[in-house]
Amino acid sequence: MDKLLQDSLFFGVVLSLLGYELGIFLKKKFKSALFNPLLIAILFVIIILLVLDIDYETYNAGAKYLSYFLTPATVCLAVPLYEHFEALKRNVWAVLAGILSGALTSMVCVLAMSVILKLSHKEYVTLLPKSITTAIGIGVSEELGGIVTITVAVIIITGVLGNIMADFICRIFHINDAVAKGIAIGSSAHAVGTARAIEMGEVEGAMSGLSIAVSGLITVFLAPIFAALF
């Protein structure tokens, strides 16, 4: 079976897309944020690989081609920001303060959790980049001596949870301003959360897309400082 699938370059791509389509179908049918398409796709792929006894390398031989679209997809997030540039200019200082607060809050929470749970330094720095996009988070984790595979998993989990809980959190804390919603989601749940922000509205999506890049840069500069604190 592995040999047959290894010879098929598109097995991983097809399996991933089928899982995502299943997630979209379930979300539309049940109209619940719990049926997040990315989460459903992850669970679907894991179950199929376990049931058919297919190793990850065989799956990734085809699925890796999906990652080639990550960079252009991220760049495309600049389009809604360009369209709502006036909103950014009117709120530039509030936007920067919000993103900085989001990045700092993420790292302070990781520091506090590491102290409370008595994590090792390696485990601590592995979790530090949890709220930034994967491409930047991998580099930060490697530079600080973290466990990159766990960093990637934590980043994905953070994004999925942010996507699922974004609406609930905004309602609980009465966050109604579109710019505030976008900054909060983008600085805490990176690209996966931004997908939900775009569904909320164009301004939310634009501000969230901006937050991905800026919070990533802030984390790159501040992560070494925080790494030295524990």
Image (spheres, rainbow, N blue to C red):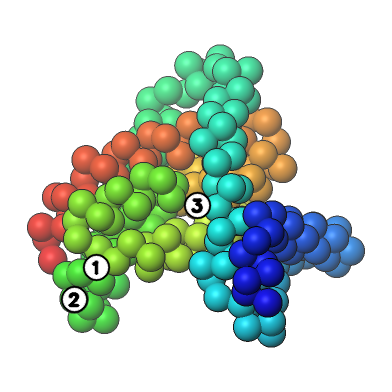
Label 3 SS: helix
* Location of mark 1 (residue): 124
- Crowding at dot 1, Cα within 10 Å, few <14 / some 14-19 / many 20+, comes out as many
Kindly identify the residue that appears in the image at 58 percent across and 47 percent down.
Answer: 65
Density class for disc 3 (Cα within 10 Å; few <14, some 14-19, many ≥20) is many
Amino acid at dot 1: Tyr
Q: Nearer the viewer, residue 94 or 163?
A: 163
Residue drawn at (45%, 65%) of the image: 153
Image coordinates of residue 16 in percent, x first then y, are: 68, 60
Helix, strand or loop under label 1: helix
The image position of residue 139, as x and y in percent, is 30, 48
**Exactly how many numbered labels are in the figure?**
3
Sequence-wise, which precedes: disc 3 or disc 2? 2
Q: Are marks 3 and 2 in contact (CB under 8 Å)?
A: no
Q: Where is residue 211 in the image (x, y as percent from the top left)?
A: 45, 37
**Between 110 and 7, the one nearer to me in the picture:** 7
Specify the farthest residue to the left. Answer: 228
Please state, as top left, top right, bottom left or bottom right, where the N terminus lies in the image: bottom right
Q: Would you say residue 177 is visible in this rendering?
A: no
Circle on res. 189? 3
Q: Residue at x 36, y 45 (%)?
A: 136
Residue type, mark 2 in image? Ser
- Foreground residue, 100 or 134? 134
The alpha-carbon separation of the residues under discs 1 and 2 comes to 6 Å
Pair 3/2: label in front: 2
* Residues marked 1 and 2 touching at CB (< 8 Å): yes
- Amino acid carrying mark 3 in the image: Ala
Quarter containing the C terminus: bottom left
Whether residue 47 sits left or right of residue 131 in the image: it is right
Nearer the observer, 15 or 33: 15
